Image (cartoon, grey):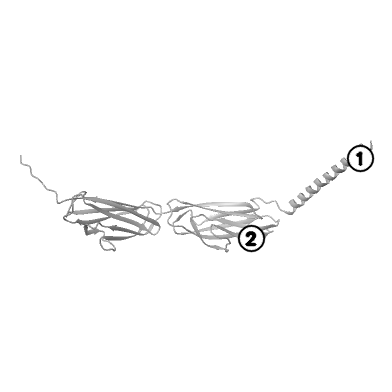
Amino acid sequence: MRNDRKSLVQLLTASLIGLASVVGVVLLLSQAASAKPMLDGTDLSVSKTASADRVQVGSQLIYTITYQYVSTDTVTAVVVTDTLDDNVTFLSASPPASGTGSIRYWSLGDLSQPGSGTIVLTVEVASPLLDGTILTNTASIGCEGITYSSSQITTTVDAPVLELGKSDAVDPVPAGATLTYTLLYSNTGNGPATDVVITDVLDSQVVFAASSPTPTSGTPPTLVWDIGTLTPTSSGQIVVTVTVQSGLDDGTVLTNSATIDSLHTAPLAVAETTTVLHGAPVLVALTP
């Protein structure tokens, strides 16, 4: 009987100790919850805008980040972070930013009163880029390593798309005859192409005769035309006339190559080949 009572006392004692531990944990959690404010995206928030919905290659783009805190509870170690697109380069920020590469951040410290602030970030769009490339930028705000709000914005790149075509007349061409090349160029993209240059290299077995328009520079066999700015949907043509050398073997192949390039595009090259007939065509009159 004594053993049963002793066991019962031990069991009650253990239960009371366990209950006290649980109560202690609950009290600690309650104190921690009351010491640290429960935030959400409405208490600590961030938003952002861009200076343009569409932007040209090689130009500057300005992002404006606005952050806001509406609570009177104290939050510590508040940080605003901005993640740049891989196709832009960071230029500057006001206030100055910390970080490197595509990640930039601003340490706001502790906030205990409602308020707001603005960050202005300037980047440069890469060049060349494909027409229609989407630039994505994301800003976020948080404290003590926890993100409470984020804002993402996209911008479309308007880039030039240069096209160049070339044709010959006549083909095949008799040795010693006139050969005409026609170059057709255009910009089919959504952005203007600046400093457009077309270069045409003649075959060594032809002699330059004339062109319309006249080349801006160069010495045959290399001819150069400075087109300048080619706006979207605009186009033009260049006609080059040469004389094929006499005495060339039948089947000789003449090669003419041309390239179009600009400040914000990669060079585009085309080529045209023409077959030579030996001597001029002979007209034979048939007698009935």
Where residue 209 sits, quadrant-wise, is bottom left
Considering every residue shown, the one lying at the far left of the view is: 288
Query: Which class describes the residues within 10 Å of circle 1: few (<14), some (14-19), or many (20+)?
Result: few
Taking 22 as reference, is 117 left or right? left
Left or right? Give the position of 108 relative to 51: right
Residue for point 38% across, 56% down: 266
Q: Position of residue 21 (x, y in %)?
A: 81, 47
Q: CA distance from mark 1 to mark 2?
A: 62 Å
Of the 4 image quadrants, the one containing the C terminus is: top left
Please identify the quadrant where the N terminus is shown: top right
What's the residue at 89%, 39% (across, down)?
7
Residue type at mark 2: give it.
Leu
Q: Residue 255 at what x, y percent from top left? A: 26, 53
Work out which residue is located at the far top of the displayed protein and give it.
1
Q: Which mark is residue 6?
A: 1
Q: Secondary structure at mark 2?
A: strand
Q: Which mark is residue 221?
A: none
Q: How many marks?
A: 2
- Residue 19's image quarter? top right
Residue 17 relative to residue 142: left or right? right
x, y percent for residue 119: 57, 60
Label 1 SS: helix
| Residue sitting nearer the eye, 94 or 272 | 272
Q: Which residue is mark 2?
A: 108
Which one is nearer the viewer's eye here, 63 or 280? 280
At label 1, the amino acid type is Lys
- Between disc 1 and disc 2, the foreground one is 1
Residue at 63% of width from left, 56% of height from top? Answer: 68
